[in-house]
Image: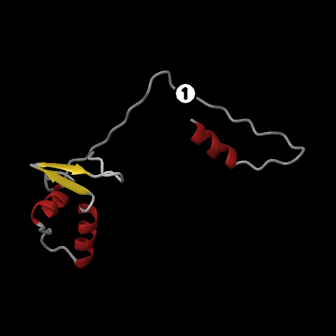
Amino acid sequence: MADALATLASMFQLTPHGDLPYIEFWFRGRPTHYCRVEEERDGKPWYFDIKRSVESKEYPPGASDNDKRTLRRLAAGFFMSGSILYKRNHDMTFL
């Protein structure tokens, strides 16, 4: 909430003798959750190429040099333990 207030405060310019703007807040009584997951076109999860790259250093067929470089960069942040793919946090904590 403090971040939102700081952002709102930075959006207004105040004059020395002017009126202050009025900001009205609305809130819900209960938290609202929204999750939209679209089905993959090829039926594979989003991390399939990363997992395959970490396991066997293979790239998707037809991948360009830029795609391969991007995949190597993404895969560097992941770790395989058995068949489970973990993401490494900045302090090397597995997520």
| Quadrant occupied by the N terminus | top right
Q: x, y (%) of residue 77?
A: 27, 58
Along the viewing direction, whichever of 94 and 9 lies nearer the viewer: 94
Residue positioned most to the front: 91
What amino acid type is highlighted by mark number 1?
Answer: Phe
Residue that appears at 14% across and 53% down = 44
Residue at screen point 85% across, 48% down: 15
View extreme (right): residue: 17
Image coordinates of residue 27 in percent, x first then y, are 55, 27
Tell me: residue 66, above or below residue 55: below
How many numbered marks does the figure carry? 1
Indicate left or right for 36 with 44 as reference.
right
Placement of the C terminus among the 4 image quadrants: top left
Q: Is residue 22 left or right of residue 77?
A: right
Which quadrant of the figure has residue 60? bottom left
Name above or below for residue 70 compared with residue 1.
Answer: below
Residue 32 is drawn in which quadrant? top left
Label 1 Cα neighbours within 10 Å, binned few <14 / some 14-19 / many ≥20: few
Looking at the image, can residue 90 be seen?
Answer: yes
User: x%, y% of residue 79?
Assistant: 20, 54
The one nearer the camera, 6 or 93, is 93
Secondary structure state at the residue bearing disc 1: loop
Residue at x 66% of width, y 32% of height: 24
Question: In the image, 79: left or right of 29?
Answer: left
Question: In the image, is 29 to the left or to the right of 66?
Answer: right
Identify the residue position indicated by label 1 in the image.
Answer: 27
The answer to whether any part of residue 41 appears in the image is no
Tell which of 77 and 12 is nearer to you.
77
